[in-house]
Amino acid sequence: MPKITFFNLPDDKRKTLICAAKKEFARVPLYQASISNIIKDAKIPRGSFYQYFEDKEDAFFFLLNNHVASYKSHFVDTLKNNNGDIFEAMIEFYQSIISEEKENLQFLRNLFLNMTHRIENVFARSFGETDLNEDFKKISKLINHENLNVKDENELFHMMQIISSVTFHNFVKKFAGELSFEEALNNYKTEIHLLKKGFLSR
Amino acid sequence: MPKITFFNLPDDKRKTLICAAKKEFARVPLYQASISNIIKDAKIPRGSFYQYFEDKEDAFFFLLNNHVASYKSHFVDTLKNNNGDIFEAMIEFYQSIISEEKENLQFLRNLFLNMTHRIENVFARSFGETDLNEDFKKISKLINHENLNVKDENELFHMMQIISSVTFHNFVKKFAGELSFEEALNNYKTEIHLLKKGFLSR
DNA sequence: ACCTCGATATGACACAGTGTCATCTCTATA
DNA sequence: TATAGAGATGACACTGTGTCATATCGAGGT
């Protein structure tokens, strides 16, 4: 977490800093990003950066958490709008993410092409160290269980794990392959369809 | 690829170097690994390293390719032994990977917890820039298509994509969560089972 | 034995980025 | 106006990278 001084900063200075950081993390992935670039862009001296953040990662994960928080609430909305149909909701969500504006897309690209477990974890659980089950239970309640071929909570949990693995991987393919919007969406739909019908004929 | 001089090296010197590199990449992930450590351990001067490799990544991907090549042939064997049952083969394969010896496990751990797209790609296709379909077709021929609920090559391709997404993610969970062998295996079996039966009741 | 030339080895060096710290500045309050 | 605490600043030490001029080696020719 950023230090208190960061939050005490006047709004415009804080915004400038956030923009500079976002710009750098949209330019290159975390491990290639440099504090030097950020402070040069934000026009603050080196020492100040360390007044506000622990280090590069601190700044990065602050930004990431903001992004993820907003995606999360967006996803919950989407799920509600689709009456708990998790599959339709995922497709709509996937679609909306790959339609983001340029700088965000670039940021996401660097994210997904360099998805360390630490980053993935931010998606899986809120940064506030809340229990991972918290989020799962919240989502689970919103899902329409009718027609779902799962026999208990455990199977539902693993179903969600599978869906998120597949979704992540589709993002990676989209960003790596420079797939068009349509290609990416069709691939994702095909895979969701396969998940629904299962791999074995009965 | 390493430079010619690397392959011209006397066997023992080359082995020492490979061991030192492996040790470093088992200690920390690629982005944290340092050439300085490798040359200190291998007792070669700094300039020599650059005589053999382009840079850190060059050495890393050389090692990675070796690993992956051996895993690949191991997987093909496993698939054959299971008479083309892709699901049983995956489970047996998964099991064998998480049973590797310590240094390899540590190397894999750093790999999966920092799975950049560039690394993932090495798994997906051979480094030799061969067409990605090459490998897929080879595996596809070995798979027993009886009872498989796929209607064409395209669906089969996406089925394989899903299986590999899920498998990758299970490796990540295993290495991140410090799950026991049994826990990890059970989780994986559950997910494969779910994939087989599908998410929708019919 | 000696020379030569291409291949290889070596470590000093310039450079880039990190994180720290002593010191300076600002502002609110007694 | 004095003072304390919060914040700002940039010089500095340190670590690691990649390069390059120079040294060394070894096989083949004379």
Image: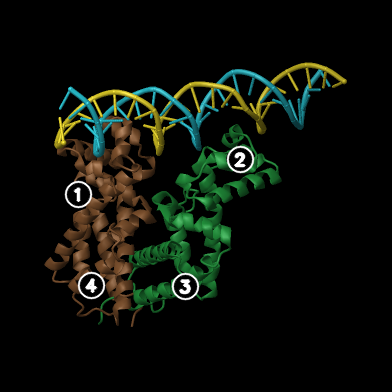
Chain colours: A brown, B green, C yellow, D cyan
Distance (Cα) linking label 4 and label 1 = 27 Å
Tag of residue A100: 1
| Residue at 51% from the left image edge and 76% from the top image edge | B83
| Residue at 53% from the left image edge and 51% from the top image edge | B27
Of all chains, the one bearing label 1 is: A
**Marks 4, 1: nearer the viewer:** 4
Distance (Cα) linking label 3 and label 4 = 28 Å
- B130 vs B36, left or right, is left
**Marks 2, 1: nearer the viewer:** 2
| Residue at 27% from the left image edge and 61% from the top image edge | A188
Of all chains, the one bearing label 3 is: B
Q: Which residue type carries mark 1?
A: Glu
Q: Which residue type carries mark 3?
A: Ile
Tag of residue B40: 2
Asked where in the image residue B59 lies, by quadrant, the reply is top right
Label 3: which residue?
B91
Residue D10 place in picture, x, y as percent? 34, 24
Residue B100 place in picture, x, y as percent? 56, 64
Q: Which residue type carries mark 4?
A: Ser
